[in-house]
Image (tube, rainbow, N blue to C red):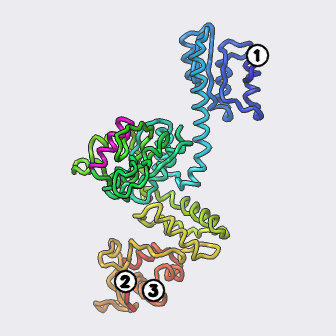
Amino acid sequence: VLSAGSAEEGLDAIGNPSQPVDLAIFDLKLPGMSGLDALEKLRGDDASKDLPVIVISGHATVHDAVNAIKLGASDFFEKPLNRERVLVSVSNCIRTARLTRTVEAMRGELEARYEMIGTSPAMQKLFQDIDKVAPTRASVLITGESGTGKELVSRAVHRLSPRMDAPFVKVNCAAIPKELIESELFGHEKGSFTGAQARKRGFFEQAHGGTLFLDEIGDMDLSAQAKVLRALQNGEIIRVGSEHVINVDVRVLAATNKDLAKEVSGGRFREDLYFRLDVFPIRVPALRERPGDVRLLADAFVNSFCNDNGLKQKRIDPAVYEALSQRKWPGNVRELKNVVERAAILSSDVITIADLPEDPHVSPFDDDADTDDAGTESEAARADAPQITGPDGERLSLREYREAAERAYIVDTLVEFDWNISKAAVTLGVERTNLHKKIRAYGIKRGEG
């Protein structure tokens, strides 16, 4: 504990990096600078703007208390001090401050380790939601498409919570057979059923004091849902084959790629369990909703992959970023990671368009492909080779002839590279997405030429 006879001495002590301060207590009336002035000075300094401060006074007014709180005081006490209340306030302030510092320190770690990367508004909202709910005991329902990173969000909530040092237990509800779900969740006694050769602790017991993550909760059958609901309501479980009640303290996070509200309406999910889980909903955005984050993710995946596999760091060609951002990514971040890692394996020092695998979700040769741009191209441009005259015998305009020549050259290049879009795009000097558009616009079909 450090003491100071004036606000100036106190500010000097707080600014000493060799003795980090967790909390400051200022008297309102001090010789020289007042406690409120010192508080205002602290809040104007980036190094101490988040330091918790308790203000005390023997001649306080309501106006003084209001001003102190407005300036960011964590608490305000009048003399004579109530020892018990002050100690509780000090403990709470220090705990909150340390948790806040942990959140900030771990944000970078979370982004690097859990691939939660993004500067888009959608991701910033996600980060804010995690920061808000993590310190609480509230149940969280995490929704999003497959591959968006719902498990990463659950781990982030756990790591930023007061339970961070306690167990984090993941349960894939979709992977557990219906007849085993109760035993897996709540455990069983020896001999309680065929094959139960020893007592087993279930996932609820394993997560005692920590966090239980119920992944794919929407795939859990109704019978198991009822048992989970009772465990959440009462904080109690009973092992299969036992009558002994076991108290458990777990925070439940659940995730699904289904619309649970529709599942409830369809009678496939219990409404009471839905409301129990949906205390704080978090939606993880699909990758197509944040194309601006594709570049950040691609860089992170390449760096991580090269580090993990002892490879020399590789650079990504700017054209690759554009091509990646044009994809729809139904597999979301997981799919992007696979594509980038494969490209890193195939590439030399620089990852180019030619290193990217074909987009399995799009084929420019499909008969039902989008041909909105086709109307802008003339019928003459659909000829196998440029001709001077069109079908009506009239001489082609310069634009029509240029289009016909371009079409013929594209077909010739595609044939040369056995219709490999990536290699043809490199030779033609265009981005693959632009080549896709040209193929569709000109009505080019695989096998021409």
Residue 223 within the segment the image draws in magenta = yes
Secondary structure beneath label 1: loop
Of badges 1 and 2, the one in the foreground is: 1
Q: CA distance from mark 1 to mark 2?
A: 85 Å
Q: Is residue 191 left or right of residue 50?
A: left
Work out which quarter of the rendered image holds the N terminus and state it. Answer: top right
Question: Which residue shows up at 76% across the image and 16% down it?
Answer: 5
The answer to whether mark 2 and mark 3 are in CB contact below 8 A is yes
**Occupied quadrant, residue 146:** bottom left
Q: Where does label 1 land, which residue?
A: 5
Secondary structure beneath label 3: helix
Q: Where does label 3 land, which residue?
A: 414
**Percent position (x, y) of residue 143?**
38, 50
Which stretch is magenta? 222-237
Q: Where does label 2 land, which residue?
A: 444
For badge 1, the amino acid type reads Gly
Camera sees residue 245: yes
**Percent position (x, y) of residue 437?**
41, 74
314 to 198, vertically: above or below = below
Q: Earlier in the sequence, mark 2 or mark 3?
A: 3
Crowd class of label 2 (few under 14; some 14 to 19; many from 20; radius 10 Å): many
Viewer-proximal residue, 118 or 425?
A: 118
